[in-house]
Image (tube, grey):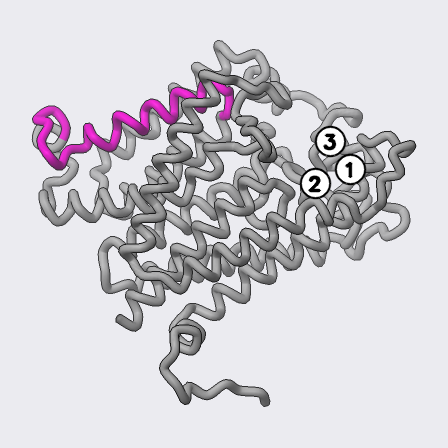
Amino acid sequence: MFKINRTEESRLTSWYFETDRKLLVMVLAMIFVAMIMAISSGSAMFVRTMNMAHKVQWYDFFVRMIPFYVIGVITMIGVSMTDKKTVMRLAWADIIVFFLLLIGTVLFPHEWNHSHRWLMLPGLPRVMPSDLMKPGFVMVTAWFISKMKSIYEGDMFNLKRTLFQVKTWSWAWYLAPLVIVLAIQFWHPDFGTMLLYLGTLFVMLFMAGLPGKWVASLMGIGGGLLMLGVTFLPHVRARTLGMFGAVDPRSQIGFALRAIRNGGLFGAGDKAYIVENLPMAESDFILSGICENFGAIVSCALIVLLFVVFWRLLHQSKYARDDFTSNAIIGTAAMFGIQVCINLASTLRIMPAKGMTLPFISHGGSSFVAYCLLFGMALALIREDKWK
């Protein structure tokens, strides 16, 4: 059995032996699945949308994704070698830069697929600031919660003390920019990402000891935002009400469900044709493409892998010695787990379609690079907490 012995103390060998190799291998396995699907569903996407007179090759979609895979993997491994201070510097840089770019989506709106959540930068591909801000959001939130806990001890959720009496450390400084972010996401509209941010924050606050009355209040706020969306946004209303009617076989969700059924247990092989008629099969409905091409058994194995990644993060947060590290890993698990659930539930018609990618698996450069950065930060914090 090939085995590497720790015979020297270099930065690379220290990283190899100290990093959470199980988590890293599982993430790399998800990226490998993404590369396979970039060829499979990507080629189907080009058949569906491109003029074949352009002589588009079946592998063009995969080639187009290679830079994102390279940048993402290098970012994840590089960041995982750093320490807590570097992670926080990266987190602050991430959240400041993409917060400003998020404001840019309001000042210079670029509509694509009925949403303004994208920004076109000169010489660069289309980017989604809300996606790229996720790592900074998780880390800064974890840092702020740990600071509030250390300063106010068991009284951090006393709003008379920590909000209305604005001091150096107050919830007001955190909530003010968060409200701006949520308002912009509501304006885009991008209810899926807004729900993801709120859900992640809720889990992190709950694990930090949020009182029951505030749990009920936050759930009420979430329900109120949903009602506002249904009332004032026609496409949100149509998708929500569509959940209670018969499935149109020619609709997006209709094609998605038919593709899953057509795949059976072992995949349709050469008979996998429904996915070629499914819009967003390479991103929002990637599970349908996997089911039709490779079958329910492979799809369930992938879902198990996603669950094990989630469980591994929770396991590491439970045994973290540092409060900030524990909060950050919980936030990473919440962000990852909630997005997985939203994507799968949308594909299976358990909830209205939200335009949410499947982390690491779906096509989407912004989402892929953001999650590579987030997991690189998590790996760095786990390694330092365990060994330093």
Task: State the residue at coordinates (24%, 64%).
Answer: 321
Q: Residue 282 got which mark?
A: 2
Q: Amino acid at mark 3?
A: Pro
Task: State the residue at coordinates (74%, 44%).
Answer: 61
Q: Nearer the viewer, residue 309 or 133?
A: 133
Height in image: 221 above or below 68? above
Q: Nearer the viewer, residue 123 or 72?
A: 123
Q: Going by the picture, which residue comes out furthest to the front? A: 123
In this view of the protein, can residue 206 be seen by the observer?
Answer: yes
For numbered disc 3, what is the local secondary structure?
loop
Q: Quadrant of the C terminus?
A: bottom left
Q: Circles 3 and 1: CB distance less than 8 Å?
A: no
Q: CA distance from mark 2 to mark 1?
A: 7 Å
For numbered disc 1, what is the local secondary structure?
helix
Q: Residue 15 colored magenta?
A: no
Q: Which residue is mark 3?
A: 279
Left/right of residue 237 with respect to residue 78 in the rendered view:
right
Q: Residue 45 got which mark?
A: 1
Q: Amino acid at mark 1?
A: Met
Q: CA distance from mark 3 to mark 1?
A: 8 Å
In this view of the protein, can residue 350 be seen by the observer?
Answer: no
Q: CA distance from mark 3 to mark 2?
A: 8 Å
Q: Single out the mark in the foreground, 3 or 1.
A: 1
Q: Amino acid at mark 2?
A: Glu
Residue stretch rendered in magenta on the structure: 163-190
**Residue 101 in the image: x percent, y percent?**
43, 28
**Residue 183 in the image: x percent, y percent?**
39, 20
Q: Earlier in the sequence, mark 3 or mark 1?
A: 1
Q: Residue 315 got which mark?
A: none
Left/right of residue 133 with respect to residue 308 in the rendered view:
left
